[in-house]
Image (cartoon, rainbow, N blue to C red):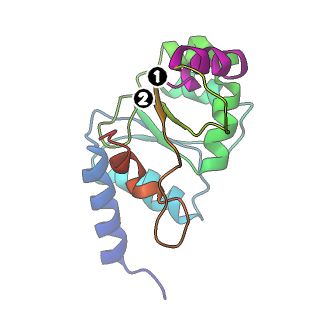
Amino acid sequence: MPLGNGNLAASAHHIRQTLGLTPDDVGLNIMPLFHIHGLIASLLSSMSAGAPVVCTPGFNALKFFQWFSAAGPTWYTAVPTMHQAILGRAGRNQEAVAGSRLLPHDKLGEEVAAVVVFKQDQLADAAEIRAFAGERLATFKVPSKIIVRDEIPKGATGTLQRIVLAEKLGLV
């Protein structure tokens, strides 16, 4: 089913409101514009807020931080695989990250938490878990909050319910 102008405008409006975009924001679009995420979530939502958008020729993890430094964005959006590639290179681009204008977002969160389910007869305290993670992860990926559970909460079908997980764990 084709999307009409009304659908595009409504989607852009809702994304703009959810993210709290204003004319003072600068978007960095690394998504292709033939992809609905690139077209609506990145480009049209910014335009509906009267905010500028810098469009890259496409995603390139090796060039992301160059574009990032040049554009000075307050936000960008991407699919999970792109976020993973960017996070994988963030440690080598600390200057760009430290000098960024990215804004914390109250709905999307900024604090890393981990839920730990120990194997039988194994225990560790939060400091030991953070130390273990710190040896293997970039600093910003090390959880600041450790939650120990007998099991990770799952829905009726036995699958992880990511949408309500933070609430079930008392994180929000």
Residue carrying label 1: 144
Disc 2, SS: loop
Where 49 falls versus 5 (above or below)? above
Q: Are marks 2 and 1 in contact (CB under 8 Å)?
A: yes
Along the viewing direction, whichever of 50 and 68 lies nearer the viewer: 68
Where 135 falls versus 160 (above or below)? above
Is residue 59 at least partly visible in the picture?
A: yes
Where 42 falls versus 122 (above or below)? below
* Label 2 vs 1, first from the N-terminus: 2
Along the viewing direction, whichever of 98 and 154 lies nearer the viewer: 154
Is residue 57 at least partly visible in the picture?
A: no
Q: Residue at x 32, y 41 (%)?
A: 170
Where 76 falls versus 8 (above or below)? above
Q: Crowdedness of circle 2 by 10 Å Cα count: few (<14), some, many (20+)?
A: few
Image coordinates for residue 134, horizontal then vertical, percent = 64, 16
Quarter holding the C terminus? top left
Image coordinates for residue 7, horizontal then vertical, percent = 34, 75
Magenta stretch bounds: 126-144
Disc 1, SS: loop
Q: Considering the whole magenta stretch, tell me its main secondary structure.
A: helix
Q: Residue at x 38, y 36 (%)?
A: 109
Residue carrying label 2: 111
**Identity of the residue furthest to the front in this view:** 121
Q: Can residue 4 be found in the magenta stretch?
A: no
| Gap in angstroms between the C-alphas marked 2 and 1 | 7 Å
Q: Quadrant of residue 32?
A: bottom right
Mark 1: amino acid:
Ser
Image coordinates for residue 149, horizontal then vertical, percent = 49, 41
Mark 2: amino acid:
Glu
Q: Quadrant of residue 61?
A: top right
Along the viewing direction, whichever of 9 and 155 lies nearer the viewer: 155
